């Protein structure tokens, strides 16, 4: 099943022009460009053994399955398989939502009051499967990033499980780590202060008993 979207593209520029070609951009703005691609797929299914273990729910638990091709600057950048436990998000009619242009997480926030406290992601470089390569407009077995993600809410329930393929020439991630030393120093200082107070109190108590 195919869908289309219309884009207005600005700041068009030339890249990778062969040295023996003389090329010129006559207009850096194009309006009304229509792109065709696969529609988002939404279906209800039952959890198999793999998914029941991931979610920690019984087999055959109803799930919502959403498949989307993600675009970046008008180009297919990622192919996402998302699974959601239906009873956690049952008040959302996904068939009526604009998942092509909207954010799934914002939808869960606003309509199901679900906020993710813990997100666990595993990245791995793999050769792109044939069926996914066709949708991402790349060659089969071309290197892509495979990302498997679980997202848990405030109650520790796994709400979402995703299996994604991201084009390695478009996708990137930036991770920053920091160690907060001040917290441990403050805790250590507090422990020392409390130790002095308890020590002084015990000393006074034993001194009083000795005098008695």
Image (cartoon, helix red, strand yellow):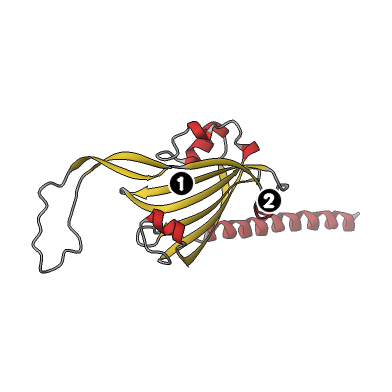
Q: According to the image, label 2 marks what residue? A: 52
Eyeballing the image, is 154 above or below 13? above
Q: Residue at 35%, 56% (x, y): give it.
A: 137
Q: Residue furthest right?
A: 212
Residue 203 versus residue 89: which sits nearer the camera?
89
Task: Report the residue marked by disc 1.
Answer: 68
Q: Where is residue 77, by image quadrant? A: bottom left
Q: Is residue 73 left or right of residue 158?
A: left
Q: Residue at x 54, y 31 (%)?
A: 93
Residue 24 image label: none
Residue 192 picture location, percent across and down: 66, 59
Disc 1 is placed on an element classified as strand
In the rendered image of this protein, does residue 32 appear above or below residue 69? above
Q: From where the camera sits, is residue 177 visible? A: no
Q: Residue 36 placed where, x, y %?
A: 34, 44
93 or 114: nearer the viewer: 93
Element type where label 2 sits in the image: helix
Q: Residue 91: tell me if it is visible.
A: yes
């Amino acid at each position: 099943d195919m869908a289309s979207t219309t884009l207005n593209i600005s700041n068009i520029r030339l890249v990778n022009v062969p040295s023996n070609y003389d090329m010129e951009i006559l207009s850096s703005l194009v309006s009304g460009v229509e792109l065709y691609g696969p529609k988002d797929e939404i279906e209800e299914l039952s959890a198999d053994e793999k998914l029941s273990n991931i979610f920690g729910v019984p087999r055959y638990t109803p799930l919502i399955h959403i498949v989307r091709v993600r675009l970046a600057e008008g180009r297919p950048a990622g192919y996402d398989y998302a699974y959601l436990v239906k009873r956690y998000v049952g008040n959302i009619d996904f068939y009526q939502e604009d998942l092509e242009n909207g954010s799934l997480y914002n939808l869960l926030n606003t309509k199901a009051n679900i906020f993710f406290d813990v997100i666990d992601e595993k990245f791995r470089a793999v050769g792109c499967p044939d069926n996914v390569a066709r949708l991402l407009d790349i060659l089969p077995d071309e290197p892509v990033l495979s990302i498997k993600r679980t997202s848990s809410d405030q109650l520790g329930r796994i709400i979402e499980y995703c299996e994604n393929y991201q084009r390695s020439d478009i996708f990137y991630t930036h991770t920053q780590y920091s160690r907060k030393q001040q917290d441990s120093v403050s805790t250590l200082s507090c422990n020392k202060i409390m130790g002095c107070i308890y020590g002084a109190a015990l000393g006074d108590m034993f001194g009083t008993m000795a005098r008695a």
